[in-house]
Amino acid sequence: MGMAETSYNIRGRQIGGHEIETIRDLIRGNDSLGRTAISRLLCEQWPWEQSNGRLKDRACRVLLLALESKGVIKLPSRLRVRESFNLRGQTLPDLCEIDQEAVTGKVSEFRSLTIEMVRFTPAEKLWDHLVHTHHYLGHPWIVGSYLKYLAYLDGRLVACLGWGSASWKVACRDSFIGWDTPLRKKNLSQVVNNVRFLILPWVKVEHLASKVLAANINRLAADWHSLYQEPIVLLETFVDVARFQGTCYRAANWRYVGDTRGIAKSCNGHCYHGQPKAVYLYPLGSDFRERLHA
């Protein structure tokens, strides 16, 4: 009898010898279909779904890449070579003409603040371009559910916001909620992460950031449920304290609950990068703990 195969915990799934053989068989029988098709077939076979019934195929692709990086499996060659993400050279639609004249003053001096959800709309390209060009982290690699917003002050574009699936495990957040591992796995889909927040560099308006956050939050839960058929009860974000102080989150009544450990996921597991981030949370109701413990 051969030596037992190592077990791995990736994306919240325990992958042992039986699961690895299932994956290998699936690859052998479907290698001509490509990696995306294999990940979807694997999601269907396990099954691996979000609470709204959508397949977790992006998470599955991350899992497959992690197993390949460990030498456990061999994925088929890509069907086509992916070009690196580059929006700087793209021609934007006419509606994406960007007025970069300075916007200054106090937010109280302006008449209207409008928040527009642009996910799956033509204006999404504008969001992508602005975040890729002006946010220090660039465009995010989207895994799971995601919403994108543009904010307009008296008709002038002033900010971009992005919301995505929550981080899998955050010690101070989980302690604040009172989660154990089974509860976290069951209810994590009800937590959403503010993964990007960009005030455009030519906009210098006092108290604008907290005002934009509050206005976006007012419609976020309804938009999320409309698109993904899932409720959300808690928001999270991570602030790079080497760059920012989290002032706008505190002004918008977010709660600081602690810091991350300065560890990031990689295909080979986790690596220490030495840059802890401040964790802020925003409950969407006084009963958020009860709902996250249900």
Image (cartoon, rainbow, N blue to C red):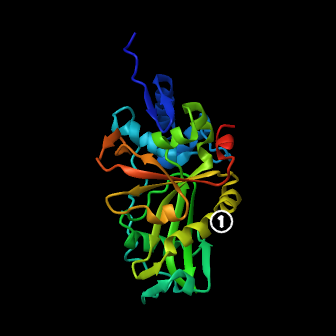
Q: Position of residue 148 (x, y in %)?
A: 55, 66
Q: Mark 1 sits on what residue?
A: 218
Is 149 above or below relative to 80?
A: below
Mark yes or no: residue 98 visible: no
Residue 195 vertical placement versus 49 (above, below): below
Q: Is residue 49 left or right of residue 136?
A: right
How far across and how far down the image is residue 181, in percent? 54, 32
Q: Residue furthest bottom?
A: 101
Q: Give the vertical position of 242 relative to 130 (above or below).
A: above
Disc 1 element: helix
Q: Position of residue 257 (x, y in %)?
A: 48, 47
- Percent position (x, y) of residue 52? 68, 47
Q: Nearer the viewer, residue 212 or 268?
A: 212
**Quadrant occupied by the C terminus:** top right
Name the side, left or right, on which 99 lies relative to 150: left
Question: Is 266 in front, or is 289?
Answer: 289
Residue at image location 40% in from the left, 16% down from the top: 4
Viewport quadrant of the N terminus: top left
Question: In this figure, what is the number of numbered marks?
Answer: 1
Asked whether the viewer can see residue 198, the reply is yes
* Left or right, 270 with reference to 51: left
Foreground of the two, 87 or 261: 261
Local packing at callout 1 (Cα closer than 10 Å; few below 14, some 14-19, many 20+) is: few
Q: Residue at x 64, y 48 (%)?
A: 54
Amino acid type of the residue that numbered disc 1 sits on in the rendered structure: Asn
Q: What's the residue at 43%, 81% (across, down)? A: 204
* Near-viewer residue (154 or 86): 154
